[in-house]
Amino acid sequence: LRDEEEDVKYIPIIKEPAAEILARDFRTPQSTLVLKKEVEVDQVNAELADKREEFLQRMEAITQKRAEFERKEQANKERVLKFDRFIKENEAKRCRAIKKHQLEMKENRMKQRELQDLLKQFEVTKARQQKLQKRVSNCKVYEDYLTEVVDNLPENYLDYGVESLVMSIIQKYETHQSTNETLIINLTKLSDELEQQQHNLEAVHQEYDTSKLMMTSQLSQLRMECDEMKEKNKRMEQKINLHRGHFIHQSEEVGALLLAINNLAEQCHAKHYGILEEMSILTKLDMVKEFIMEKKTISQMAVHINSTTITGSSDQIQNKPGVTNWMKPQTNTPLVNSNKTIAQQKNRKKQTNSNAR
């Protein structure tokens, strides 16, 4: 049985892709490996171009959405202006209607006062008429008596001279009547002047009330405009503060991004790119990309070299006669060491990436 086991040739099962086998084999020509790496670089460049095209398409969509948003915002502003104009027109109509209503109410109150004054005057004149009628009725007796006396007087009663008693009474009556007429005329003039002054006073009061109403309405309108301007200023201040904070945040992000790119460029500087301070951002990114690709290829080649040395040593041990099974676990020590070196390289890459960020 032991001889049969020694005669058996173990065929290794290949589970790795052909690209890794070619890269791991020393007999593979370097031109093949370079072509393979160029293909990978072309794939990465194609993915980068696709991402750039996708980014441009998204930016174009964002610009279209922004233009649509600005158009809608302009339409909303025009609608708000029209609505504001409509509200102002309605407010002006309301103010005019209120003024007209107040003027009509004022005129109605004035007419009511005039009506009350006329009714009072009518009552006074009616009472005076009744009083005069009563007085006339009372004086009717004297009139009848005088007519009877005149009828009974002789025909030549006026020949007694100016110093007669009747003539003195008649003269007194005539003077009293003339003074009474002058007093009545003066009283009517004074009453007319008083009425005119009252009308003037009412007109002055009306003008004062209308001017006061107009001034109060103008004051209220100016207060409303002042409140609107204050609200508008508050909104503008809030908008300016919001834009200022957003701009500061964007500038901080851009500054941090530029600082990270400059740090990466300093760590990954290559001499054939020229002076670092004269490079553009895209040139620095290309240099960092080239540096990362070089490190990646170096790490892959190191892994392949370690794996080929391990497989070669294991094949030599298996082909030797008299090798027992207890020697097989010792061949796994280089694999452990290679895995440790790979893990250390990955940790170093992570640390460099974290420091660059």
Image: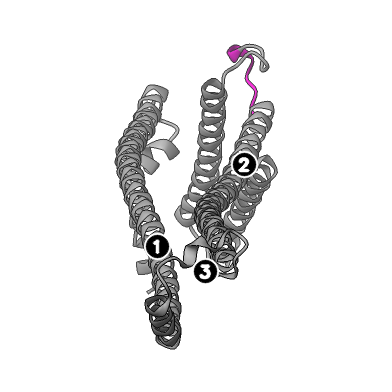
Dot 3, crowdedness within 10 Å: few (<14), some or many (≥20)?
A: few
Quick check: 184 above or below 25?
A: below
Quick check: 277 above or below 90?
A: above
Instruction: Tell me which segment is drawn in magenta.
Output: 268-273
Report x, y in % for residue 244: 62, 41
Checking the image for residue 244, the label placed there is 2
Q: Which of the 4 image quadrants contains residue 256? A: top right
Taking depth in this image into account, of 250 and 241 the one nearest to the observer is 241
Q: Secondary structure at mark 2?
A: helix
Q: Amino acid at mark 2?
A: Arg
Q: Say which residue label 3 marks.
A: 325
Quick check: 195 above or below 275?
A: below
Residue 105 appears anywhere in the view = yes
Q: Say which residue label 1 marks.
A: 107
Q: Secondary structure at mark 3?
A: helix
Mark 1 and mark 2 residues within 8 Å of each other at the beta carbon: no
* Nearest to viewer (mark 1 / mark 3): 1
Examine the structure image and report whether residue 225 is included in the region drawn in magenta: no
Dot 2, crowdedness within 10 Å: few (<14), some or many (≥20)?
A: few
Query: What color scheme is it?
Result: one colour
* Nearest to viewer (mark 1 / mark 2): 1
